[in-house]
Amino acid sequence: MLEADTIDPLFAEAIFQFNNGDYYACHDTLEAIWNDAWQSDRAFYQGILQIAVGLYHLQNRNWYGATILLGEGTSRLPAYLPDYQSIDVEMLLEDSLAILRSVQLSGKEGIGDVLASMEQGDLKIPKI
């Protein structure tokens, strides 16, 4: 549970957007944060941003975009394990990597099956 006074309000907005599946808006919010972030925080924000864009592409059945962006995003976050800035990075990575594996294994023709698995709860939708 996030404490309202422990995180930046703009980051709280990005968290809300991500957790509500508004990945495009989350991308825009995180991009504004990422542009002004300390160098040590940039990969953290960029990783979440890229996962959000990967999930956006997945929603739109863009297999290539989902694969690339989920891969890029998950590769940036291990340095922030197990948690960082009130985010359970370990859980975010675990859930995002499970989706990435499913997308990769499904191939372009199976992307609808991945989405169905997410809707049915067989694949956990990442939250931050």
Image (cartoon, rainbow, N blue to C red):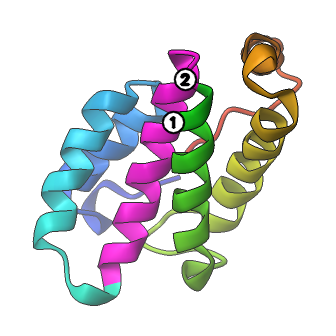
Q: Is residue 52 magenta?
A: yes
Which mark, by number, is residue 62?
2
Q: Which is the main secondary structure of the residues drawn in magenta? A: helix
Callout 2 crowding tier (Cα within 10 Å): few <14, some 14–19, many ≥20: some
Asked if marks 2 and 1 touch (Cβ < 8 Å), the reply is yes
3 lies above or below 114:
below
The residue that appears at 22% across and 65% down in the rendered structure is 34
Q: Which residue is mark 1?
A: 65
- Mark 1 is on which residue type? Gly
Looking at the image, residue 79 lies above or below residue 21: below
- Residue 73 x/y as whole percent: 52, 59
Determine whether 37 is above or below 70 in the image: below
Confirm whether residue 128 shows in the render.
no
Q: Residue at x 68, y 48 (%)?
A: 96
Disc 2 versus disc 1: distance between alpha carbons? 5 Å
Q: Which residues are magenta?
A: 41-62
In the rendered image, residue 128, in percent from the top left (x then y), is placed at: 52, 49
